[in-house]
Amino acid sequence: MTIMTLWQPILVSAVLSFIAGSVIWMAMPWHKKDWSKVSNQESARQALSGLAPGQYNLPHCPDMKALEDPDMQQKFKEGPLAFITIVPSGLPVMGPKLALMFAYNLLVAVVCAYFVSRTAAPDADYLAIFRISGAVAFIAYGMAFIQDSIWFGRPWSSTAKTFLDALIYSLLTGGAFGWLT
């Protein structure tokens, strides 16, 4: 079994995961409260205007040596502490983001195909293929968000919901691979 022979489950799992993600993010309620409104949105917008797209932190402490400064320590004690991502201004354009998401789904499926092709016996049954591809898909879709909760304050509830998403994507991926391999 090679990755090239697994082209059908690669495409089908990518399409199924893309459709599931679209439904989850557009129709399901569980991500609706992942972000909150800033209490004084106009003041916050003014304070952040002019920043180039990128990642910022507040207060900005360039290294551990700077953290020894009592003024810097006071800024951390007083807060707020924030990790801010600035994206380019303009109306949201979904087409390129959806294309990138589908490309990511394909990448995950190719990685799943690699693991299936390297670990499954040629006569492996549905469940064996399902386990391998489903586990790899779950890791690919869900595990990185743990780091965001540990280091960047992403709410654990958001990470838990992302795990639910990852479980759905991994079940669809495992099912497609098990069925079409």
Image (tube, grey):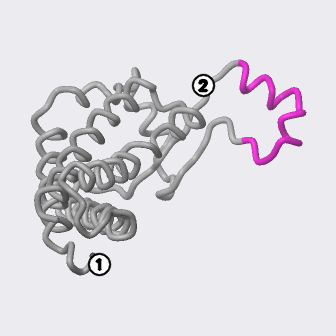
Residue at disc 2, secondary structure: loop
Label 2 vs label 1: CA separation?
Answer: 52 Å
Expressed as whole percent of the image width and height from the top left, the position of residue 180 reads 12, 63
User: From the viewer's perspective, is 42 left or right of 26?
Assistant: right
Q: Quadrant of residue 151?
A: top right
Dot 2 crowding, Cα within 10 Å, few <14, some 14–19, many 20+: few
Residue at 38% x, 43% y: name it. Answer: 142
Image quarter of the N terminus:
bottom left
45 versus 123 height, above or below: above
Q: Quadrant of residue 57?
A: top right
Q: Quadrant of residue 117?
A: bottom left
Q: Main secondary structure of the magenta part?
A: helix
- Which residue is labeled 2 in the image? 80
> What amino acid type is highlighted by mark number 1?
Thr
> What amino acid type is highlighted by mark number 2?
Pro
- Which residue is labeled 1 in the image? 2
Q: What are the residue bounds of the magenta stretch?
A: 61-77
133 versus 44 height, above or below: below
Towards the viewer: 97 or 73: 97
Residue at disc 1, secondary structure: loop
Examine the structure image and report whether residue 76 is included in the region drawn in magenta. yes
Identify the residue at the far front of this view: 123
Residue at 36% x, 69% y: name it. Answer: 114
Expressed as whole percent of the image width and height from the top left, the position of residue 110 reads 30, 69
User: From the viewer's perspective, is 175 left or right of 141?
Assistant: left
